[in-house]
Image (tube, grey):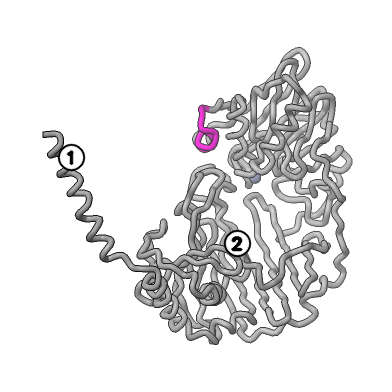
Amino acid sequence: MRRVAVLGLALFLAAPTRAVSQDAPNIIEAYNRAKQLVDRAVAAHGGIEALRSARQMRVRFAGDDVWRHQSRAAAPPYDREPHSSELFIDLEKGRLIVDQQRSYPGGIHRSFRFVTDGDKSYFVNHRHRTYTVNDYPRADTQINNLYALPQLILLDVVDSGRRIRPLGRMKLASGAIVDAVVTTTANGPLTVGFHPETGRLHCTFGIADDRVAGVSAGETEFLDYRDLNGVMLPTKRVVSVGGEITEERIYADATPNYRSPDDLVRPPAGYVEFTAPAAMPQVRELAREVWMVGGSSASLVVGFADHLLVVDAPPSSAAATLKQIASLAPGKPIRYVVPTHHHDDHSAGVRAYAGAGAKVVTTAGNKAFLEKIAGTAVEVIAGRRVFSDATRTVEIHDIGRNGHANEMLVAWLPAEGILFGGDVIDATASGIIERGSNNALTQFFDTWVRARQWPVRTYADGHGSVLDSAAFKDLLSRPVLAR
Ligand SMILES: [Zn+2]
């Protein structure tokens, strides 16, 4: 009986395999299927010359940044802030310039220009009125900027020649259906999706390693093509991670056949060169067994008699900080890790600390979010929690709902006069106060602190700045700039 059953199963398995292999394309057929899709797209975009004209183009964008994991609340819907930018592409001269204005929740504004001119490049901070010499890659390899134009994506696909392969019909996390092609361009691997009806480029997509959600779909979609000053461009570009939108850009204006004026690649008049201090120290001791560890993504590490407490857990520096901590205070385990707020640049490192045995401490609104990252239960505090033993006292306080986050903790060390917060001080990591450093969140923080009448001697922030009370006063005396 058993032998018959096994034989029957073998026949059952063999039959469909043979049928499938008869239909399967060989490598030439697979390539031809991909080439059909690419050729159709080139035609739908007006031909190869129309694509090449995007190598000389100026485009103005409007729209929103959608602050996923950077909003006031941990759960969606996420806060939106207006974004405006201008992209100047002049590849004939090896030039690429991006000028952008964006804001974070809580009245924190950024206004930058990134300039690449042949083999020279620099960064402009409009609010500081400074520029800093930099080392950006060549203009024609800056795909993060160039791929704002679907024409330049398609050109790279065409130039990748025989490396294109079809992936078949696929469904995006957004719900859209595309005919997908994968290739390897001069700039690396690339997966694109074509609209089944129009044949136009609909998206680039791939697998993103999201620091909160883990392995997720990452998609950039080009929607509702139209004629804009004689150029076929999408009405908007939507970027999403795991189906959650992170960016919505409107193509507001375009100038084809763009020739960049030489003025554009010079630092704006009146701006001064800013040279950042050579090496940012990775460990700074603020008091005995009180350390700031990790440059501009810092944690406050506080020693108690037989354990440590860590405030803020930036994911980018968590592993290095854990290693540093082991040599700063050998034998003392990290018992608690307290992110100042849920924003992922302050909190997503908790997974590493939880793995090292630390208890994650947060407020009620961030419980679910942090348990998802940490993969374990967290401790919830309401308003205030005091950590104390014979050697040390650290008070953790929620400064309350503000424009940046609904719940936000600060750490106060009364004996040492040290106050640590996250995002509350917008000076540079090396502590330099610039034009535009004062903002609505810093003012909220200052008002809250002054009401406590604490004798603060040192103000420290998770992005690295450490100011004495005179420097903090200087920061607060600066005007708050609108944008
Ligand atoms: Zn934040």
- Residue type at numbered disc 1: Val
377 or 133: nearer the viewer: 133
Magenta stretch: helix, strand or loop mostly: helix
Q: Is residue 400 left or right of residue 368?
A: right
Asked if residue 327 is among those painted magenta in the image, a careful observer would answer no
Which quadrant is the C terminus positioned in? Answer: bottom right
* Residue 313 image-quadrant placement: top right
Q: Which residues are magenta?
A: 369-377
Give the residue at the far front of this rendering: 3
* Residue 382 image-quadrant placement: top right
State the residue at coordinates (58%, 59%).
65
Classify mark 2: helix, strand or loop.
strand
Q: Is residue 33 left or right of residue 256?
A: left
State the residue at coordinates (15%, 44%).
8
Residue 244 coordinates in the image, percent (x, y): 47, 53
480 or 221: nearer the viewer: 221
Residue 208, above or below 1: below
Residue 253, above or below 1: below
User: For disc 1, does the CB lie below 8 Å from ligand 1?
Assistant: no
Q: Please say if the residues under marks 1 and 2 sit with CB atoms less than 8 Å apart.
A: no
Residue bearing the label numbered 1? 6
Classify mark 1: helix, strand or loop.
helix
